[in-house]
Amino acid sequence: MGASIQFLTVGRTRRGPLSEFEEQLLGRIERLTTCQRQTIPPSKNRRASQRRREEGRSLLSKRPPRGMMICLEPGGRAFTSEEFRRRLVDWRARGTVTLAVGGPDGLDESVIEEADGLLSLGPMTLSHELALIVLLEQVYRALAAEAGHPYAFH
């Protein structure tokens, strides 16, 4: 089954279709592996740099002592679904995989520096809530492929 996966985000997904889809995808992932969804509260600071710094400290405090922390970041590496599947297998072989998604202001440089890898979902800008949905779907697709599920890459 491999190591667990932790989805770590700034703030919760607002109620509505994205929240419902998030719950559905998490349920599918939980049938294939142990996973956890953790959130940290968004900073209320007035300045974006201070918000990122405060949120960054909170995100880093939730990082497990062992395993990999991969952050969604526009400057990160983009993968095909198959490449992502192979990479996820490799990361899980090293322990818990923490997939971190920043808030509306992005991630603080301290988090980016501490990350074991940076992942881009492509060159388009996505809301942090939608980015999480895309990430969840790709994790589910990768795990389904590993389990031999026909959904994987069709």
Image: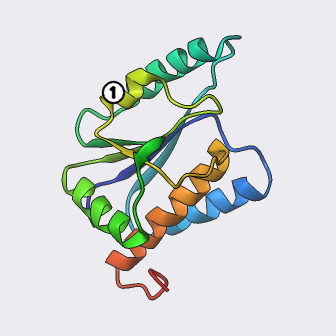
7 left or right of 33?
Answer: right
Residue at 45%, 81% (x, y): give it.
153
Seen at 78% across and 48% down, the residue is 15
Q: Position of residue 65 (x, y in %)?
A: 25, 32
- According to the picture, the residue beneath numbered tag 1 turns out to be 113
Give the class, few, some or many, for how many residues have Cα within 10 Å of label 1's Cα (few <14, many ≥20).
Answer: few
Could you tell me which residue is drawn at 42 percent across and 84 percent down?
A: 149
User: Which element is circle 1 on?
Assistant: helix
Task: Please state the horizontal and vertical placement of residue 1, each as a whole percent of the image.
Answer: 28, 67
Q: Residue furthest left?
A: 94
Q: Nearer the viewer, residue 9 or 82?
A: 82
Q: Residue at x 52, y 69 (%)?
A: 28
Q: Position of residue 141 (x, y in %)?
A: 46, 72
Q: Can you give x and y, in whole percent of width and height, for residue 151 in the image?
A: 49, 84
Relative to 13, is 41 above or below? above
Q: Quadrant of residue 70?
A: top left
